[in-house]
Amino acid sequence: MSLASSEAQAKWKALPAAERKEDLAYRRRETPPRAELAAGIRSGGILFIADDSRATLNVVRIEQKSTKPGVVTSTATTLMIPFIKENGEWKLAQ
């Protein structure tokens, strides 16, 4: 949460300890590992900037599996990370 905006940090700190623990577990489970996230950004991450105070980073992950010759299953997941500018620095919005 150290990269989050002051507002997001305050809201998170106001949650009961059990909810903070659950929230952290969810974030860790849903956010890809650093190397995977970096690779996703390099291969097609898109940063949308709105009015120089809000932005959203979209990263699409595509997984392909072949269970037998000639059969490929693909799954695409889009991760959207919202940012807000705070004191001239971009911070996580939530």
Image: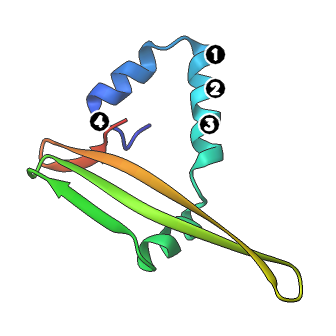
* Mark 2 and mark 3: Cα distance apart in space: 6 Å
Amino acid type at mark 2: Glu
Q: Find out whether the residues at labels 2 and 3 contact each other: C-beta distance under 8 Å.
A: yes
Q: In the rendered image of this protein, does residue 42 appear above or below residue 33?
A: below
Q: Label 1 to label 2, Cα distance in Å?
A: 6 Å
Q: Which mark is residue 18?
A: 1
Observer-side mark, 4 or 3, equals: 3
Q: Is residue 80 above or below residue 15?
A: below
Residue 25 coordinates in the image, percent (x, y): 65, 35
Neighbour class for label 3 at 10 Å: few (<14), some, many (≥20)? few
The x and y percentages for residue 21 are 62, 25
Disc 4 from disc 2: Cα separation: 20 Å
Mark 1 and 2 residues: CB-CB less than 8 Å, in contact?
A: yes
The span from disc 3 to disc 1 (Cα, nearest Å) is 12 Å
Res. 22 image quadrant: top right
Q: Which image quadrant: the N terminus? A: top left
Question: Counting residues from the N terminus, which is met first, the one under dot 3 or under dot 1?
Answer: 1
Q: Residue 27: where, in percent of width, then height?
A: 57, 40
Q: How far apart are marks 1 and 4 (CA)?
A: 22 Å
Query: How much space separates mark 4 and mark 3, taking CA atoms?
Result: 19 Å
> What's the residue type where badge 1 is placed?
Ala
Residue named by callout 4: 5
Disc 1: CA contacts within 10 A as few (<14), some (14-19) or many (>=20)? few
Mark 1 / mark 4, whichever is N-terminal: 4
Q: Residue at x 60, y 60 (%)?
A: 33
Between 6 and 23, the residue placed more toward the observer is 23
Is 50 displayed left or right of 25 in the figure? left
For mark 3, what is the residue? 26
**Residue sitting at x 28%, y 63%:** 47
Residue wearing tag 2: 22
